[in-house]
Image (cartoon, rainbow, N blue to C red):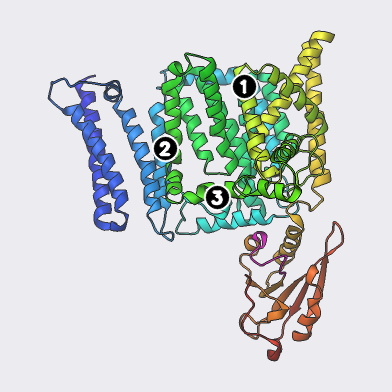
Amino acid sequence: MGSGERDRKALVYLLLGLAFACLGQYYFTFRRPFYRDGVVFYGIALVMFVLLWRRTGRSKRRLPRMGGWRWVQAHPLRALALVGGAVLSFGAGWSALHRPPDAAFSDLLALWLIGIPWFLLAFAPPLPPTWSRRLGAWLREHRMEIARLVALLVVAFGVRAVALEEIPRNFGGDEGTQARAALELMEPPLGNPFSTGWYSVPTMSFLAYGVAMRVFGATVAGARMLSALVGTAAVLCTFLLARELWGKRVGWMAAFFLAFGHYHLHFSRLASNQIGDALFASLGLWLLVRGLRSGSRGTLALSGAVMGLGWYGYFGARLVPIVAALYLSWRTIVEPQFLRRQGRNLAAMVAAALVVLAPLLLHYLAYPDTLAARYNQVSIFASGWLRQGQEVTGRSALSLLLEQFWKSISAFHYTLDPTFWYHPAIPLLDFVSGVLMIVGLVWVSVRWRWPANGLLLLWFWSAVVMGWTLTENPPSSMRLLVVTPAVASLVALGADRLLRLAERIVGGRSVAWACVGAGLVGIAASLNLGYYFLQYAPTRVYGNPTAEVADVLCDVLEQREEVPPVFLDGAPYLYWDFGAIAFRLRDVEGTDFSPEGWFWGGEAEREALFVILGENADDLERVRSAFPGGKAEYYYSEVDGRLLFILYEVSSPPDASLLNPHPRRRA
């Protein structure tokens, strides 16, 4: 290295060191409450000055060297990326932990977003001088496959994004709660993205939906659009994973089965974060497999980063590191030299996961109850479900566990989803896909020693057992989106093995059998799309009957130019803070009321709109007696014809003798 290049690097270290030192001192002097940020910046400055000293030092005395230190000397910029990225991520989490909840967190989010790619740059391989020509040649060689893949993704996105306002018909309460939390988090000043909120869900997922609504609008379709994009990305990653493990044909069929499968399609159309589980699983495991095969440390570091990022979404994604750990343990046992070859690469993967996860880990260390809160609610052990089941039914624990296992393993072929998150009238797989999945599962089990098949089996069975068998009320569809790419791969493998076997026994040209495979995929796609859009979509099953009432009410009030103060007589079935109402009617003044505690919530001369649920229809006469002269409108379900609610609108002040100035508060 010439003296000129050394001098330029020394100048860079000097300028960066001085800049970060000044920034740190700025925080110490002018932003004293955020002194921890100043510590972070000064720490980066110290690293810069150490590198500067190493670059310009005149001492020739040789010091004892260790392997790690030799690497630092040989790659100072990569070492700086490792230290700087980790410091920024941990510093962001530490500062977030000690800031008041009403403070601004945008600067800490920026530090985290800078720190992660900075850390990952330490593992990025140098680009060869001819990289642009190689990329161009690769694109030309694979242009037809890329064009077909783009076409598939466009169609997959289309079936997920079309008519998002209307399908599914109801806007669920949990959807509304998450969308409202996203809007509140995005309100200036930006809330804490490294914390937990509703049902102990990490707030980072709310931030993602909030950003999406800034782009697509704070509407039902805007709230659901991110899920459509994430679901489409999961189709792409499933293609990449299956292609990497079993070849092109399996990759294409797995992508098709996932793209049009009604289970994955439904959750791709909800404003809820469960759909991210499928993306984190397929992307994280694809990068893991790709990195192990190529020996690329950077690819494995990306895999770890994806697995760490998955912790910021729904809880199902936390299964991915467990699957990866089981797979790597198995490879270590059956391959004696595995750790020797991959040890440092796997260390980079773990380090990247920890750096990404650092702020949330610090939150869990400070509030350990939030880490296991959801587990304690749904686990058959922690919640006491298993013990209570034994006491109520008189059955043994083994008998109850076997029943749980049967409900879980038969979810794709027989047992129906019992929750209102989806509640379809058919199993989670269509007829054709269900048969093909069994074929694929048998083949994979027979060939379990193949690394690709071993990974798939670990993925499928750990998800089914941990996500369903050991939780209450299986098969609850929202808990197992993480397994949908694995199921699509099993279906594709079943189809592929049947085609190979038929070609061997019957004979014939490969093109003809490829057409048969395309026909199987087409039939399965038609069955799924036909069921979801033609049979399921017209119903209002999703979100339970309460969601239908809230959705129709929101539709009615959103069509009005002006809405007077709303008084909702819905207890104990529906309250004004129901998620769908809280999101869609967030600009409408409303409150709960009961005929047992009349009150007027504001000025006596204003109009008022009373909403009386069908279950409380008898209250209409009591409202009419206190507010005579109003206009009543009745709204019925278009599905079963039941009375949903009554709108009673008045424009004159009520009889003061009938009012109670103190409203009844809901417990």
Identify whether 65 is placed above or below 510: below
| Above or below for 648 versus 315 | below
Q: Farthest residue toward the bottom? A: 657
- Dot 1 or dot 2, earlier in sequence: 2
Q: Quick check: 390 left or right of 110?
A: right
**Residue at which label 1 appears:** 454
Provide residue 41's location: percent of width, then percent of height: 29, 45
In the picture, residue 125 is in which quadrant?
Answer: top left
Q: First in sequence: mark 3 or mark 1?
A: 3
Instruction: Give how far apart the Cα atoms at labels 1 and 2 are.
Output: 29 Å
Three-letter code, disc 3:
Ala
Name the outermost residue toward the right. 641
- Residue at the image position 75 percent from the left and 85 percent from the top: 626
Residue 151 appears in the figure: no
Comparing 179 with 100, the one in front is 100
Q: Tell me the number on the disc at residue 373.
A: 3
Residue pointed to by mark 2: 355
